[in-house]
Image (tube, rainbow, N blue to C red):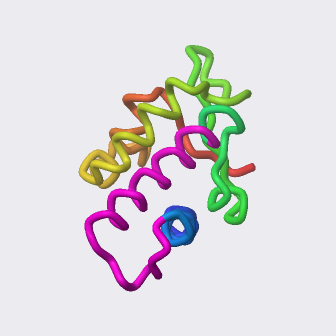
Amino acid sequence: MLALLIDWLLAGLIASVLTGRPMWAGGNDYSLMHTTAFFAMSAILVGLVGSTIGHRLCGLRVAPVRDSKTYDGSPGLLAGIIRSLLICLVIPAVVFDRERRGLHDLAAKTIVVRR
């Protein structure tokens, strides 16, 4: 949760710079830019590097789940896009299985692990 909050705040700062409005001012153009910045930042960083800035600060990373249950490498851009899109929809992120993997991780075939 903390990693998500950090990433959401960073996306808010990016949206503030791009719209010229402070985070607390809100508005439709700011909200759209905030969500777009969060999606882009999350999809690109998770897909290519395996972690967002929030994940790094919290000592986490997103790893692909392979058939052999090894968690090496980065998930790939497509998995990052799927995962980020579903997180932006919120519901898949709060519904999870016995292993505590949210629907966004199940759909992208990823898992959050400690670094």
- Residue at x 58%, y 19% (from the top left corner): 66
Task: Say left or right for 86 vs 2.
Answer: left
> Does 14 appear above or below 79?
below
Residue drawn at x 50%, y 24% is 78
The region drawn magenta spans 19-45
Q: Position of residue 104 (x, y in %)?
A: 38, 39
Magenta segment includes 38: yes
Q: Residue at x 45, y 77 (%)?
A: 21
Residue lying at 29% horizontally and 45% vertically, measured from the top left:
92
Query: Foreground: 19 or 55?
Result: 19
Q: Position of residue 80 (x, y in %)?
A: 52, 34
Residue 44: which quarter of the image?
top right
Q: Most extreme residue toward the front, as rendered?
A: 20
- Given the current orientation, which residue lies at the most extreme top position? 67
* 53 relative position to 33: left or right: right
Give the image location of residue 11, x and y in percent. Answer: 52, 63
- Give the prevailing secondary structure in the magenta stretch: helix
